[in-house]
Amino acid sequence: MIEVCTSLPRSVFLAGETIQCYITCTNTNQQQDGVDSLSWASVQIHCQCSVSESRVHLIRTHQLSSEEVSSSSSDTSFAPSKGERGLTVLATKPKILFCDLKLGPGESKTYIYEESLPVEAPPSFRGQAVKYSYKVTIGTQKFNEPTKLLRIPFRVLVLYGLNDLSVYTDNGEVTPTNPFLKTQQKENTVLDIAMQVLATITARKAPHSYNITNARGKVAKCILFKQAYKLGEDIIGIFDFKDGTVQCVQYSVTLQSEEQISEECRKKPNQGTAITSYVRHQETCLHTEKSYISIPIPLTATPGFITDIVCQRWRLHFEFITTCEPIKEPEKPTKPDQSTTWRGPATLNVETMVWDLPVKIFPSNPLHASSVTLIKTANSIRI
């Protein structure tokens, strides 16, 4: 019997990166005459898209089923998406690892599979109506036996704008030379360039101020230090109620994602947008001059993206509970050693105001995202 073990160095990759997968075949038979063999083994990466049939209607150009991707449906062919739900929207060319592999008792051989993820690939996504999932599939077979499949799931993050990497590389004509330094320079990888781009996009620049008003007057001023964030960062903001003419009793801020199906793929013409809430911050702010918010962005979330089927955007959902009539402030003590007691009213005449502010969320370093994922990076099968 031969045991096939496979592993990935991490569970999260950036579109455009090169994936390395290690495949080890070991003959577990310890007898002297226990030579075993495998006829062949192939590897392929594929992305499956599953949709909610009650919300999404796929047009013919999107309907590429798992059976249509494989050249044959027999048990001896290599069909990586066999048995998978949904449609295959991306499949790399299968690569042959070996043919007619023979292993002696206790002998093992290791192969390294390398494949670059397309930059235009969709990201991994688990929405309410659409899901994208990636897997590395290893197919192998013994003589006169059905093909066995071994799969490892992984996550893909997408950063748009990396189609032409030459834009971000230095030109040798303008690079200064130094006779005391080595002339050989290490080329920047896709990950290095992506991190530089992310650092520029999400850098803190001038703060953004927003005056929050209703029909009765000014409620507060909201200050956010930037509008573009990476996964794992905190959205920091300040509410200034000092110059407000309308008293705010309580406010809440919720980080939400909007999942919108494209018009040609909607099941119903008037179909709404699916909203998912992640983090909620709530404060009571009556008679408060300033209040601070800190909303963490989960590393497991999917940044904003768009495909032919679905579009995901992010926003901050604000809710303000304001008074319809002024409430007297508590009397301040005239001397430092004095104290006063203030009891809030039993009932209040209030109204609610809602405000949605779009924000941009980009991928983070895949190494950081891998540290919190629960995806297993190794799998094995006995043949």
Image: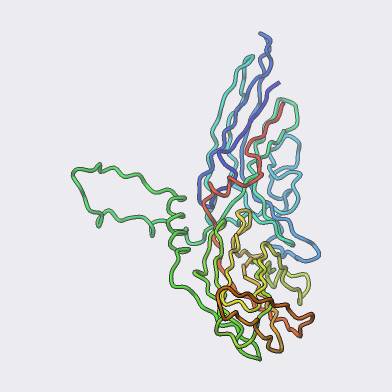
**Residue 258 shows in this picture:** yes
Report which quarter residue 282 is drawn in.
bottom right
Q: How many labels does the image show?
A: 0
> Residue 291's x, y, as percent?
58, 72
**Residue 257 shows in this picture:** no
Residue at point 63% right, 57% down?
301
The C terminus appears in which quarter of the rendering?
Answer: top right
Report which quarter residue 113 is drawn in.
top right
Q: Which residue reaches farthest left? A: 179
Using the image, determine if residue 217 lies above or below residue 209.
below
The N terminus appears in which quarter of the rendering?
Answer: top right
**Relative horizontal placement of residue 224, taking residue 106 as reference (left or right):** left
**Relative horizontal placement of residue 373, taking residue 54 as reference (left or right):** left
> Residue 351's x, y, as percent?
73, 84
Of 118 and 77, the residue lying toward us: 118
Applied colour scheme: rainbow
> Residue 335's x, y, as percent?
56, 78
Of 115 and 133, the residue lying toward us: 133
Q: Which residue reaches farthest bottom? A: 216
Residue at point 43% right, 54% down?
193
Residue at point 54% right, 61% down?
362
Using the image, determine if residue 299 lies above or below residue 209.
above
> Residue 184's x, y, as percent?
29, 42
Of 108 and 157, the residue lying toward us: 157
Report which quarter residue 211 is drawn in.
bottom right
Q: Which residue reaches farthest top? A: 32
